[in-house]
Amino acid sequence: MNSKIIINLSLMGATLGLVACNNAPKEETRMEKQVDNALEDITQAKDDAAKNMRALHEKLAIRLVKVEAKLKEPGTTKEQQQEWEASRVELKDQMKRLEDGIGEVDRSTNETWKDVKEGTRKTTEDVDNWFQRQAEIIDRKTDADKDKDGH
């Protein structure tokens, strides 16, 4: 009787071993798919962050061209020149922040992306808020509401 128990236990152990080995490739494939999906998500998030920063940079570049044109207009007072020059310097500073952020996104690895993502999100929000405030200031100075936002 002991030999029957030993044989049955051996057969049961062998069967469990075969079942476990049979499930291993399925589990490995599932894990590979999860890793691939996570990498795709990171790549997409990096692309989106860089795209948003580039779009905002383009808005600032357009505004910079307009400010530089104002600086060249004849008949502007010394005070107006100083204000436009201050705007030009601030625009360039904000553009540099975005350029630095885009560089960080481009250089980030999958391991560093979480920290870079948070920093670039904050930079983008800060610069965008600054840009909106500047538009409102200009609207007040020129008695215009070109963006029709009520400010």
Image (cartoon, helix red, strand yellow):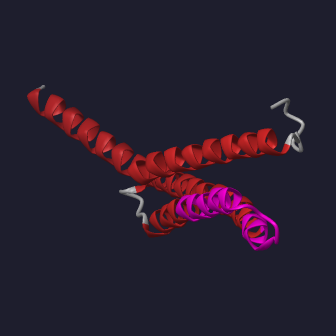
For residue 69, side relative to residue 22 (left or right): right
Task: Give the position of the N terminus as an image quadrant.
Answer: top left
Residue name at image x 42 percent, y 47 percent: 23
Q: Main secondary structure of the magenta part?
A: helix
Residue name at image x 58 percent, y 65 percent: 92
Task: Give the position of the C terminus as an image quadrant.
Answer: top right
Q: Position of residue 97 (x, y in %)?
A: 50, 60
Q: Position of residue 27 (x, y in %)?
A: 43, 48
Q: Is residue 78 visible?
A: yes
Q: Quadrant of residue 56?
A: bottom right
Residue name at image x 47 percent, y 54 percent: 35
Foreground pick, 40 / 67: 67
Q: Position of residue 69 (x, y in %)?
A: 78, 71
Q: Quadrant of residue 91?
A: bottom right
For residue 53, side relative to residue 110 (left or right): right
Report the span colored magenta. Answer: 66-94
Q: Is residue 69 magenta?
A: yes
Foreground pick, 104 / 12: 104
Vertical placement of residue 95 versus 18, above or below: below
Foreground pick, 76 / 16: 76
Q: Position of residue 90 (x, y in %)?
A: 57, 58
Vertical placement of residue 20 versus 28, above or below: above
Vertical placement of residue 69 versus 39, above or below: below
Foreground pick, 30 / 121: 121
Residue name at image x 81 percent, y 70 percent: 73
